[in-house]
Amino acid sequence: MQLIPEKSIASAPSESASETFTLDVSGMKCAGCVRTVENTLKSEAGVKNAIVNLVTEVAVVECAPGIDSAVLAEKLTQAGFPSQSRQSDTAAPDGLTPAERQQQETRQQTRRALIAISLVVLSATGHLHQFGWLSIPGLSNIWFHWGLATLALLFPGRSILVDGWRGLRRNAPNMNTLVGLGTVTAYTASLIALLFPRLGWECFFDEPVMLVGFILLGRSLEQGARSRATAALQSLFDLQPTIARLIPADSPTLAPNAAAEIPASQVKVGEWLQVLPGEKIPVDGEVIAGQTTVNESMLTGEAVPVLKQSGELVAAGTLNLSGAIVIRATRTGKDTTLAQIINLVETAQTRKAPIQGVADTVAGYFTYGVMTIATLTFSFWYFIGSRVWAEQIQQLGHHAIGASHALMHGGGMADMGELPTSPLLLSLKLAIAVLVIACPCALGLATPTAILVGSGIGAERGLLIRGGDVLEKVHQLRTIVFDKTGTLTMGQPLVTDCLPVTADISADDLLQLAATVESGTQHPLAIAIQQQAQQQELPLLQADQFQTEPGLGVAATIDQNRVIVGNAQWLDRAGVAIPQAAQTQAETLTAAGKSLVYVAVNRDLIGLIAAQDALRPDAKATVDRLKSMGLRVMLLTGDQQTAAQAAAKQLGLSEQAVLANVRPDEKAKTIAQLQQQGTVGMVGDGINDAPALAQADVGIALYSGTDVAMESAGIVLMRDRLSDVVESIRLSRATFNKIQQNLFWAFIYNLLGIPIAAGLLLPSLGIALSPATAGAFMAFSSVSVVTNSLLLRSRFR
């Protein structure tokens, strides 16, 4: 197995010089907070772009060189979002790993939720005697319920009120601002009614208790769901070894007591390390001594152990199974394959789908809009609604949905579910319900949670998808274009025919000349010819003045003779004529699906060499499945038309689906032409495919491909299986469908919930939501979005 080079999974370089770094950002509660953080960062001089993830609580900042990340972190901290620059892939400056920070947050949320729910239970117990069930002295007293409401706001609800006030003060109100306004308003109105009984107002102290309880319960459930969503990324962090066994250089001893244990982070390139059976390989390296089998499933998703012996490469985090080995470190720290995969997955989880732009725009004004609607709701019902529909409200009050228990002075209580009779309190309750039912959090969680789960599933299966923008493009794909050599085929052609066309040269001489000239290039056909010459023990000749023309051929001078090796176009450019007999032979070979190389000396053709590259075992099944998914499949190759058609016939592709004789510099132009007919995906592996991969809407690169090809791709297939093209498209489509579902329900929830909370159904049906019920619905909306994203796993078990 080869390792991913350092640049292979990095983002393509931008046109102008820039730096990218990560900030850990806390204090974000909803999409409005995300918008505020992004705007704060973008407003700083030198910052080109900033993308913030609500779920993972990170900000990826692209800026001009020389910008101090600590300064930006301090700006966010001053804006109310405590931040710090990410110093490593595993731990933040506070000394906590991402998992530890998430566990700490989960414990805090759970503790607050338990306290709040305990208060809700006590509050509800005080109403049981209304149903004739149980009467506990003191629990139905109004002062007892005042105490519960006070405790709810001072302890579990304190964080909501403080954060909401801070957001309002810095002109960046968030979800806590809305909830805080609702709970404080309900508490204040009830307190006034308690202290001034002559006003005749009802008390509803259970509303703030229930609001805080439902909100915190929902957040606790949401935090648990978030933890499950980030489990795949955390499992990658857990794979990183912490200990390495250092041994003296040039001393490949396998004795356990000969090694000194050091932190894996301190290993330097070139140092020799000992790895015992059952241990994780600490860094990327080359086996120097010993032989073993290695479990590489964490990289490739393939559970079958791989044999490793001297000269072969191993990757950090893979598990040594059977024997002790000594390795020489080739890449350490952030340069290891595992570290780069973690970086890619983290980056993928931050990059947004363009569809999220709509939600981001709405989120920027959402909280202000909700506060405006709440104000209008209060004004309408206080000045107009309570008078126009006074009789209906009195008659239909008992049908109110979820209205809290209104407590009266002296311990008496209004009927369960009864609407307030006071116009002021009715208007106030409806306005509070509007404040607390609105859920900017659902909008903020819709995209990142789905991407988080989808990219995690992909990482487990060896499918590295670069981000939400790639997911959206995959969803729009209409055409898939495959490179042939090394992608649809094994990429290892073998020489099948060596045919001299003159009597004065033998097949061995022809092969020897071709191998000598081809030694100047690494084209698959050139490698096949060189390997065949080695098998026949034909030594290379002295040659100079090499000339290579990508997509055409190679030339060199041997014994003062110009030897030309390549395709027919190459020979034609050199002025070499191809006799009719040779053309007939060539047609027969190409009709059989073989690739041809012509060999000429000076201006005379001396022979033909044919090689054939077998299709991958899963090529036909992959093409068939893509067709069944409604995609048009095409073949793009630099091979001659006849060879390409022979491969297409085996794959079940029509002649119209074959684009042959396309030079490397023309492949990108060909993709651009196809894009005029719809969204195009390109699957390739070689350096010649890099421009086409970059041009395509979605580039898919095989793991065995070159550095440049994988750097240009939006999806990297780690298992080097062609069938994973189908799986990556299935996963991308399913993930994007989840994003669409989440955004749809988040918008529909708010579009329907806010008008109902504002009393839309009250005049006709007598249906009104109490603040507590509205708060429960709000909490449910966030939990449902995260849960819907988690359901994605059930499709890919």
Image (cartoon, rainbow, N blue to C red):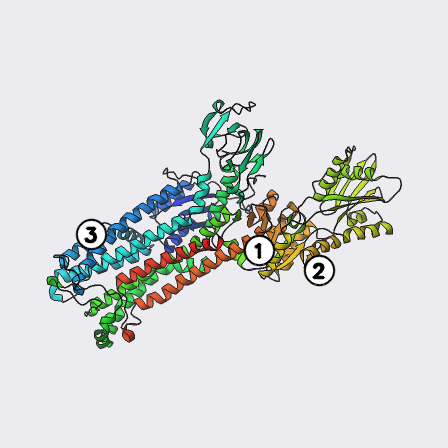
- Up the image or down, 151 lies above or below 85; here it is below
Residue 182 position (above or below residue 560): below
Question: What's the distance in space between the residues labelled 1 and 2, CA to CA?
Answer: 24 Å
Determine whether the residue tagged by mark 3 lies in a helix, strand or loop.
Answer: helix
Residue type indicated by callout 1? Asp
Q: What distance separates the C-alpha of mark 3 from that of mark 1? A: 56 Å
Secondary structure beneath dot 2 equals helix
Front-lying residue, 482 or 83: 482
- Please tell me the numbered disc located at residue 655: 2
Q: Taking 587 as reference, is 100 left or right?
A: left
Q: Earlier in the sequence, mark 3 or mark 1?
A: 3
Of labels 1 and 2, earlier in sequence is: 2
Please tell me the numbered disc located at residue 697.
1
**Structural crowding at the residue carrying mark 2, measured as other residues with C-alpha within 10 Å and reported as few (<14), some (14–19) or many (≥20):** some
Q: Is residue 531 left or right of residue 98?
A: right
Q: Nearer the viewer, mark 3 or mark 1?
A: 3
Q: Residues within 10 Å of mark 3 (few under 14, many from 20)?
A: some
Q: Are marks 2 and 3 in contact (CB under 8 Å)?
A: no
Pointer 1 with pointer 2, Cβ within 8 A: no
* Residue behind mark 3: 151
Type of amino acid under label 2: Glu
The percent position of residue 586, horizontal first and vertical second, equals 81, 50
Q: Earlier in the sequence, mark 2 or mark 3?
A: 3
Identify the residue at image location x=66%, y=52%. Answer: 667
Q: Residue at x 86, y 52 (%)?
A: 580
- The residue under label 3 is which amino acid type? Leu
- Residue 15: % across, % down: 56, 47
Give the CA separation, mark 2 to mark 3: 77 Å
Viewer-nearest of discs 1 and 2:
2
